[in-house]
Image: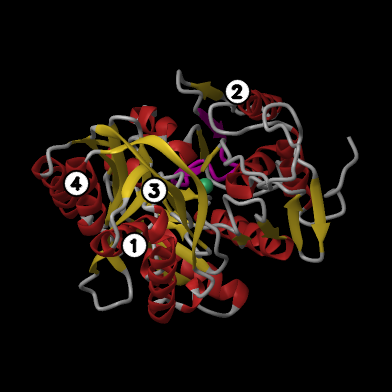
């Protein structure tokens, strides 16, 4: 293996990170990486436990003379999101990542880098391997399947850690920031039965594209457009003017990503082509006028096919679909009462799927308040019940409530100020973190989350700042020394 990162500082961290990148470790495929971590632990006399979900709890004994200090949990996740560019031939099951260094940034050639959360794991492995570092007793908890619903963290039995009172999660992506709370969430799938009839007409496919999209936890407060919602508006508007029949609808791929594209396959009368062109073009201009700057590339296009007989939705089903998409709640529902610019409760209509006899629309719900989350899930249940559908709520996870008077936050801030001469930015986020599940299981646990600058995560453009890793590592070492 040709080493690409061996000249970088901090050497021990980048050595471990490069090893991790050699081992494929997408969600549901973390056994080999867990084996590697266990090997590093055992080589360094650190006891390692693995549970049935593949999670690891590795104990690093306190450095000599610091046995009396309170233990700390360091936490990260083993799995990474596997995304690649359309040209990439990368095989995430078998190929090592192809690392590249460009100025201050590390990335992987046309794939996600998996620094989310490979860098958190690498820092913990570097702590195991370097016996000169001063620290209290450390429990490194590495979870599986964080990126696909936090299955590992759900399965964790934390009873053996019930007398630990402090935890540093290493799964954040902004240097200079400490996260002290996050929203909880759930996924709600609403299903509406459809019936179909045969009809003949000119095939017309309307596509909504060019939207900025983004992660629904990070970007919902930017008030960008949601392609599924826009498609609902388009269908409602054109169905008032033109006799359309819907044969298929689709939009979005993940409930937690704001959809950038949506498609509707229609039949129209052959002589209505011109009217449809005019109408859709007018709608495009209207929505461009009210779009946020990031959505200025929005585009509504129509592609025409043949005049054909196909199965389309019957009139009742068509009315139901247009109505459901037209009134579906979406976006920010409440801002935080603190007066700060923080979203309290939101939802994202992430996925629209149409099967032959059902429409499925899937929402991702988030709230910093578990009751508000549940109320919104109930609203979606009422919405689908009223329209003759059904709903299923899954993947509920609790909010991680901000702690008043956190000793750990005070310590971090003091250390940060000493090292970098300014204050840490203390934030609560609208995204989800595994900290929620630790906070729910161990209510006395004082938790913070930190990490180096890692950009465009979950995309093939993911790239991490080398100098930021170095500063974050210095910060972590100084925190551990202070708490030892
Ligand atoms: Zn992560």
Numbered disc 3: secondary structure: strand
Q: Which residue is mark 4?
A: 320
Of labels 3 and 1, earlier in sequence is 1
- The residue lying toward the viewer, choosing from 135 and 255, is 255
Residue 476 circle label: none
Q: Residue at x 51, y 52 (%)?
A: 304
The answer for how far apart the CA atoms under marks 2 and 3 are is 46 Å
- Give the vertical position of 339 relative to 177 (above or below): below
Question: Magenta includes 202?
Answer: no
Q: Residue at x 61, y 72 (%)?
A: 419
Q: Quadrant of residue 27?
A: top right
- Quarter of the picture containing the N terminus is top right
Q: Who comes first in sequence, dot 2 or dot 1? A: 2
Task: Identify which residue, 36 or 217, lies in the foreground.
Answer: 217
Which element carries disc 4, helix, strand or loop? helix
Mark 2 lies within 8 Å of ligand 1 (Cβ measured): no
Residue 469 spot, x, y in % from top left: 67, 59
Q: Is residue 228 left or right of residue 9?
A: left
- Looking at the rendering, which quadrant does residue 481 occupy? bottom right
Q: Which residue is mark 1?
A: 234
- Using the numbered discs, state the Cα–Cα distance from disc 3 to disc 1 in whole angstroms: 12 Å
Q: Residue at x 55, y 45 (%)?
A: 66
Q: Earlier in the sequence, mark 3 or mark 4?
A: 3
Q: Nearer the viewer, mark 3 or mark 4?
A: 3
The boundaries of the magenta stretch are 56-75
Q: Which of disc 4 and disc 2 is earlier in sequence?
A: 2
Which residue in the protein does label 3 denote? 266
């Amino acid at each position: 293996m040709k080493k690409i990162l061996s000249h970088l500082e901090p050497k021990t961290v980048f050595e471990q990170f490069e090893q991790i990148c050699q081992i494929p470790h997408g969600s549901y495929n973390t056994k080999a990486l867990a084996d590697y971590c266990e090997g590093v632990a055992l080589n360094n006399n650190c006891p390692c436990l693995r549970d049935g979900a593949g999670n690891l709890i590795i104990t690093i004994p306190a450095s000599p003379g610091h046995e009396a200090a309170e233990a700390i949990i360091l936490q990260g996740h083993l799995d990474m999101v596997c995304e690649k560019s359309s040209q990439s031939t990368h095989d995430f099951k078998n190929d090592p990542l192809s690392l590249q260094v460009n100025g201050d940034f590390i990335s992987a050639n046309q794939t996600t880098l998996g620094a989310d959360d490979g860098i958190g794991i690498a820092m913990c492995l570097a702590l195991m391997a370097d016996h000169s570092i001063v620290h209290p007793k450390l429990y490194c908890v590495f979870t599986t399947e964080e990126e696909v619903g936090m299955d590992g963290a759900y399965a964790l039995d934390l009873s053996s850690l019930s007398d630990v009172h402090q935890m540093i999660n290493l799964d954040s992506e902004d240097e200079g920031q400490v996260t002290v709370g996050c929203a909880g969430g759930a996924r709600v799938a609403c299903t509406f039965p459809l019936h179909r009839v045969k009809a003949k007409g000119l095939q017309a496919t309307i596509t909504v594209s060019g939207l900025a999209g983004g992660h629904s936890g990070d970007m919902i407060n930017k008030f960008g457009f949601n392609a599924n919602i826009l498609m609902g508006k388009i269908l409602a508007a054109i169905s008032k003017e033109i006799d359309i029949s819907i044969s298929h609808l689709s939009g979005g791929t993940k409930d937690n990503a704001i959809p950038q594209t949506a498609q509707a396959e229609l039949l129209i009368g052959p002589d209505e082509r011109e009217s449809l062109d005019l109408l859709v073009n007018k709608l495009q201009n209207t929505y461009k006028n009210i779009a946020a700057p990031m959505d200025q590339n929005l585009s509504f296009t129509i592609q025409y096919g043949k005049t054909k007989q196909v199965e389309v939705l019957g009139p009742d089903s068509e009315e139901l679909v247009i109505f459901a998409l037209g009134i579906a709640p979406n976006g920010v529902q409440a801002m935080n009462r603190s007066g700060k610019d923080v979203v309290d409760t939101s939802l994202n209509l992430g996925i629209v799927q149409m099967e032959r006899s059902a429409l499925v629309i899937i929402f991702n719900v988030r709230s910093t308040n578990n009751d508000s989350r549940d109320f919104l899930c109930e609203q979606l249940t009422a919405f689908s019940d009223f329209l003759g559908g059904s709903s299923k709520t899954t993947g509920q996870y609790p909010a991680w409530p901000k702690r008043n008077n956190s000793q750990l936050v005070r310590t971090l801030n003091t250390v940060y100020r000493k090292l970098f001469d300014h204050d840490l930015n203390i934030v609560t986020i609208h995204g989800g973190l595994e900290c929620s599940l630790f906070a729910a299981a161990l209510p006395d646990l004082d938790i913070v989350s930190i990490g180096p600058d890692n950009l465009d995560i979950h995309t093939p453009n993911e790239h991490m700042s080398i100098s930021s890793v170095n500063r974050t590592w210095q910060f972590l070492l100084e925190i551990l020394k202070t708490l030892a």
